[in-house]
Image (tube, rainbow, N blue to C red):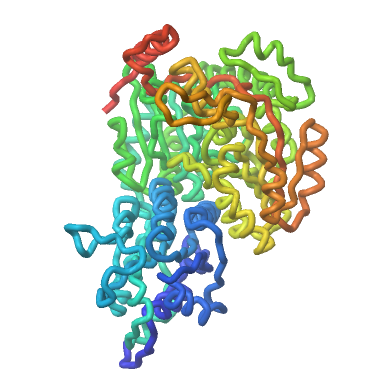
Amino acid sequence: MTSNRTLRLTTAQALVLYVSRQYSVADGDRRRMIPAALGIFGHGNVAGLGQALDQYADDLPFIQGRNEQGLVHIASGFTKASRRRAALAVTVSIGPGALNMVTGAALATVNRLPVLLLPGDSYATRRQGPVLQQLQHPIEADASVNDAFRPVSRFFDRITRPEQLLTALPAAMRVLVDPVNTGAAVLSLPQDIQSHAYDFPLEFFAERDWAIRRPVPEQDEIAALAELFATASRPLIIAGGGVIYSDAGTELERLADAVGIPVAETFAGKGAVQADASWQLGGIGLEGNPATNEVARAADLVLTVGSRLTDFATASHSLFATAGVRFASINVDPRDGDRLGATSVLGDAKLALRALADALVAAGVTTSTAWRDTVTTAKAGWLPVRAAALDADTPVDVNALRAHSTDAIPDTDAVLTQGQLIGLLQEHAHQGDTIVAAAGGPPGDLLKVWDATDGRACHLEFGFSCMGYEIPAAIGARLADADRGHRVTAFIGDGTFLMAPTELATAAQEGLAVTVVVPENHGYQVIHRLQMFTMGREFGNEFRYRTEPLTLEAGKDAALTGDYLQVDLVRVAAGLGARALRATTADEIRRALQETRSETRPVVIVVPVIPHADLPSAGCWWDVAPAEVSESDTVRAARSQYEAGLATQRWHG
């Protein structure tokens, strides 16, 4: 029942009051959908949203940030750790402040992570003439820089009248709780409109519950999928992020255990399987482990659950080599479910996996002893290789590394490899801990070797592979889990750390215990590795001094081939409010991790690692083309190898 009672509020006040009273409901769990707002104020939002957030600070807490992109990453990290049952709002000012959020919006949308973005926008009234930071497009007079959000958002609306909130806010909320179409929901807020008032219906601000629905799979689709398994000899399941968001791990493990189906994981699906079982394979694809890929090549039926199957997972469609291999999928989004010509079940992962397990168990379907032995043998061959790569107590023979490396292994103060550092972090990880990585070498290495079973969460963002995500995302994960007994660690290279360390100040300001472990290898080394593979020489990826003063005259540029750049990352981190230290040996790292576990502020541990000392290869091909024309023998050889790889690509439908 409605009434004629109204509440006169500004656009900004109405927006803040509304979002503070929205709740998500999933499996009987009711929680605040938007429990806090993040922001940086400028002239484009301080008098409007700034005033409203101040007025309703008791209803919607506000967290001050340092970088607009970083704030969106905090929101993405929070909602990922909350399994998409809660989100954060982010407000920034006009122009560059708003545009700085676009990368974060794209990351959220690509990864299907709900975030509510509230950028300021240019004046709607226009009586002011050209205003500060206005785009002034010569043809589209109503265009502003905020239109850049349109292609990277799942919902976009520009609020030019206060009463537009009556339809815009519910529409944004529907996107935030929609497992199919979620991502960045953007309400672009012209500066002047934020302060305009309207008599809003009082009922608009009543508490409202939003159900996060579980689409129910069709029984005939489950039956068709069960028939595929009944006739398959060598089935494989690939678990994506949808398994985690659906909380379908128990159902997946029951299916795999009952039928004897091996399970691989994508970046987003890392940790979907919590049982350390014989059928649990770990990461798949370009940065997966070789045992998983060996099994994948032999599979005659591949079921993907809650995954987009990007080129990293499929090795650019070269991984699945068995003639006549068939594909199936379980997904809430048909655009993802129908990839590779799959027999698709449209529905929630938890419900679909439960129904599929019931059908296969009732029919007595199991895999053969031969297939189980294939899986066991592949895994048994990989585990000692993994253990050796992670063993930090066996000194590295640098000369042996040099003898077997296709790259130069430089002399530095490092005594450990990045793999050995991961081994120490694994040794220290407790149930309930979370490790976060996003770009460069760390996410690939963690997918390959990290044990994410038994409650050790592995939070990998590789849908957008965005440098600068890791520290903010760790803050978001910390906000989602206030239990300080659970350590949240961002594992990032020195290149990423130098790009975006500033949210450490936010963590210090809020007293958020996050740990940042920086393997210092003097450059963008994962791209250096790719560069060496495709062109055979280093150019512009390592952090080195220029050998002679820079000149812009043609033919007189000296290369960046001097000594490694000397940057004191410990002092940088300490200057931003973190407890910062450097640890070099295995014992020093163990001691640093143990001594800082109970720290109540951000911690940064810098560890020198041996450059160009990589983990064992996954044994996959990736479609990155070396130059087709070159005078270099190395490039020509790389091109020949690439063309041989092209011959392994398959079109599956």
The residue lying furthest to the left in this view is 139
Image quarter in which the N terminus is found = bottom left
- 461 vs 299: above or below: below
Q: Quadrant of residue 144?
A: bottom left
Is 512 placed left or right of 157 in the picture? right
* Residue 205, image x, y percentages: 41, 81
User: Residue 400 sits in which quadrant?
Assistant: top right
* Residue in the image at 31% along x and 30% along y: 340
Q: Is residue 422 left or right of residue 255?
A: right
- Residue 430 in percent (x, y) is at 72, 44
Residue at position x 34%, y 51% from top? 152
In-image side of 225 versus 100 (left or right): left
Residue drawn at (48%, 17%), measured in percent from left and top? Answer: 533
Q: How many marks?
A: 0
Work out which quarter of the rendered image holds the C terminus and state it. Answer: top left
Q: Residue at x 48, y 50 (%)?
A: 245
Among all residues in the image, which is located at the extreme bottom? 4
Camera-side residue: 117 or 478?
Answer: 117
189 above or below 263? below
The one nearer the camera, 246 or 106, is 106
Q: In the image, is 31 to the left or to the right of 335? A: right
Q: Examine the rendering and report whether any part of residue 387 can be seen.
A: yes
Give percent across and percent down for residue 476.
Answer: 57, 56
Q: Is residue 298 above or below residue 130?
A: above
